[in-house]
Image (cartoon, helix red, strand yellow):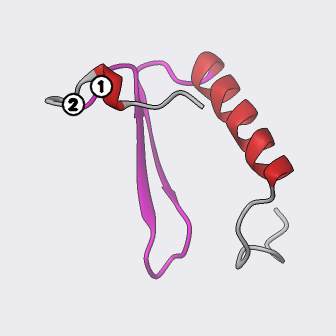
Amino acid sequence: MDTSNQGEPLSEDELRLFVEYLHRFCKHDVDLFALLEAGDPEAPAFVTITRDPVAGVERSAYRRP
């Protein structure tokens, strides 16, 4: 994995590819859930991908890119 530009935000093309890959990952690879740790190791983001909305959060609160 190329880490040379991790200090920069995603370009429009990179963001488009990320969303395309995310949709594909969710469609084909997520059975019940996926738990990921990403970003800066000193202040990581913890990502949970599930087939159900978080308890107490309305489905309408989710944005579909």
In the rendered view of the protein, which quadrant contains the C terminus?
A: top right
Q: In this view, does 29 lie above or below 14?
A: above
Magenta segment range?
Answer: 29-54
Q: How crowded is mark 2: few (under 14 residues within 10 Å), some or many (20 or more)?
A: few
- Residue 28 place in picture, x, y as percent: 64, 18
Residue type highlighted by circle 2: Val
Examine the structure image and report whether residue 49 is included in the region drawn in magenta.
Answer: yes
Residue at x-position 73% and y-position 74%: 8
SS class of the residue under badge 2?
loop
Q: Which of 59 and 30 is in front in this view?
A: 59
Residue at x-position 70% and y-position 79%: 7
Label annotation for residue 53? 1
In the rendered view of the protein, which quadrant contains the N terminus?
A: bottom right
SS class of the residue under badge 1?
loop
Q: Mark 2 points at which residue?
A: 57
Q: Residues within 10 Å of mark 1 (few under 14, many from 20)?
A: few
Q: In this view, does 46 lie above or below 15?
A: below
Disc 2 + disc 1, Cβ < 8 Å: yes
Image quadrant assignment for residue 3: bottom right
Q: In this view, does 9 lie above or below 16?
A: below
Relative side of 46 to 56, left or right: right
Number of numbered markers = 2
Relative side of 5 to 27, left or right: right
Residue type highlighted by circle 1: Pro
